Each structure stands twice: as structure tokens, then as C-alpha cells.
């Protein structure tokens, strides 16, 4: 066999091995970078949710001082309860015959909520009008796109309102009308924000 040919063959083999090593290294580095970025995003999202919950609590207390009680959710849950939370605090709706009705534009009340600090989604997903809060119905979403859980009065018998984010896993054990039904916190609730809610344990 021609030694020159043999040398070229080994050289090509080494080049292929080197290329595979480079690809593997790039994959490992990319994975580390992606994991690090995901971790930082998650940490920032948790921090944001904590801040938003505190902002909402302050706005709800302001609402109670202004109107005598917290916004009632009646039979609304999920996105609709979060809709009640936003539009009552924003001043575009008020209670009429046990439901929240939109006011005429001339009757809008003062907003108790800094909308630029919150994440809002429109109920019918018309993204083109997402920021037109006075014309379309929105709900308050946490950093993971889930509606903030809000309920008043609380079905579980506890005083005050129920308010929390389901957290990064976007899951939560449904709250019960029996405060003593669950003996301990379920795994789904370990990352709830705040961690004390829904508080059935």
C-alpha cells in the first residue's frame, strides 16, 4: 500500500474524530449555557411574581378602603376571576346584580393598579389590541402565562381574599371549601407564590 495514501487515510480519520469532538464540546457548552439561562430566567420570574402579588395586595387594600370591601368573584374562577381582579382594580367595571359589568367610559373609576408593572392577557387572545385595557377584557397573568388565582370571599372559610400564583410548575391543588380537608401541603403547591396559599393544609 502506498504510504502516502495510508497517511491521508489516517489524517482523514483524525479530522473526522476532531470534528466529532468539537461538535460534542459545542453541545456540552451549549447545554450549560442553556441551563444557566433557564435557571436565571426562572429566578427572575419567581422574583417578578412575588413583586406582582405584593402590588396586587396593596391595590386590593386600596380598593377596600375606597369602596368598603374587596372585589367579589361570585362564581368566577381561573381567567374570569383574574379578569374580575384586574378590571375592578383598573376601574372599568363594577358589580351589577351579582356580576361585574363594564361601565360607560364617562363613568370609569380611578385605577388603583400600575398596569405598566403587570402582565396582562386578553380573554379572547386578540393580541393586536392587547394593551387596550379600556375597550377589551383582560386578565392578570403571572410570569408563566397562567392567571393569578383570586377568590373573595374565600370558599375555604379563611378570612380575607385568596391570591396566589401557581408558580413555575403551573400546577396547584384545587382549593377546597373545607379548610381542614388536606392534612399537608401537596407537591403541586410547593412552588406556589406565596408559599402559604391556597392554605388547605
Image (cartoon, rainbow, N blue to C red):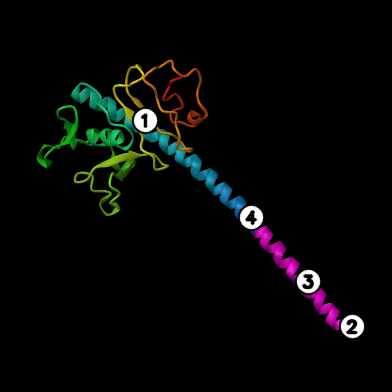
Q: Which secondary structure, mark 1?
A: helix
Residue underneath mark 3:
13
- Distance from label 2 to label 1 (Cα)? 79 Å
Q: Earlier in the sequence, mark 4 or mark 2?
A: 2
Q: Dots 1 and 4: beta carbons under 8 Å?
A: no
Mark 1: give few (<14), some (14-19) or many (20+) Cα within 10 Å: some
Q: Residue at x 18, y 27 (%)?
A: 98
Residue 148 position, x and y percent, is 36, 35
Total marks placed: 4
Q: Residue at x 28, y 33 (%)?
A: 85
Tell me the mark number nearer the camera, choosing from 4 and 2: 2
Q: Could you say which is closer to the camera, residue 112 or residue 26? A: 26
Marking on residue 54: 1
Q: Dots 3 and 1: beta carbons under 8 Å?
A: no
Residue underneath mark 2:
1
Q: Which residues are magenta?
A: 2-26
Tell me the mark number nearer the camera, choosing from 3 and 2: 2
Q: Quadrant of the N terminus?
A: bottom right
- Distance from label 3 to label 2 (Cα)? 17 Å
Tell me the mark number nearer the camera, choosing from 3 and 4: 3
Marking on residue 29: 4
Amino acid at each position: 500500500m502506498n504510504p502516502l495514501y495510508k497517511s491521508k487515510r489516517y489524517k482523514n480519520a483524525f479530522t473526522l474524530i476532531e470534528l466529532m469532538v468539537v461538535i460534542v464540546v459545542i453541545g456540552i457548552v451549549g447545554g450549560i449555557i442553556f441551563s444557566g439561562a433557564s435557571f436565571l430566567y426562572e429566578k427572575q420570574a419567581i422574583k417578578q411574581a412575588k413583586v406582582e402579588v405584593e402590588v396586587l395586595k396593596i391595590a386590593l387594600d386600596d380598593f377596600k378602603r375606597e369602596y368598603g370591601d374587596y372585589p367579589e368573584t361570585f362564581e368566577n374562577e381561573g381567567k374570569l376571576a383574574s379578569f374580575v381582579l384586574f378590571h375592578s382594580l383598573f376601574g372599568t367595571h363594577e358589580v351589577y346584580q351579582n356580576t361585574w359589568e363594564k361601565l360607560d367610559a364617562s363613568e370609569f373609576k380611578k385605577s388603583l393598579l400600575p398596569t405598566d408593572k403587570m402582565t396582562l392577557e386578553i380573554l379572547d387572545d386578540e393580541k393586536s389590541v392587547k394593551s387596550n385595557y379600556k375597550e377589551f377584557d383582560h386578565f392578570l397573568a403571572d410570569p408563566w402565562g397562567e392567571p393569578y388565582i383570586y377568590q373573595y370571599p374565600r370558599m375555604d372559610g379563611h378570612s380575607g381574599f385568596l391570591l396566589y400564583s401557581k408558580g413555575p410548575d403551573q400546577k396547584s391543588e384545587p382549593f377546597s371549601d373545607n379548610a381542614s380537608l388536606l392534612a399537608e401541603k401537596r407537591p403541586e403547591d410547593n412552588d406556589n407564590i406565596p408559599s402559604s396559599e391556597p392554605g388547605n393544609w
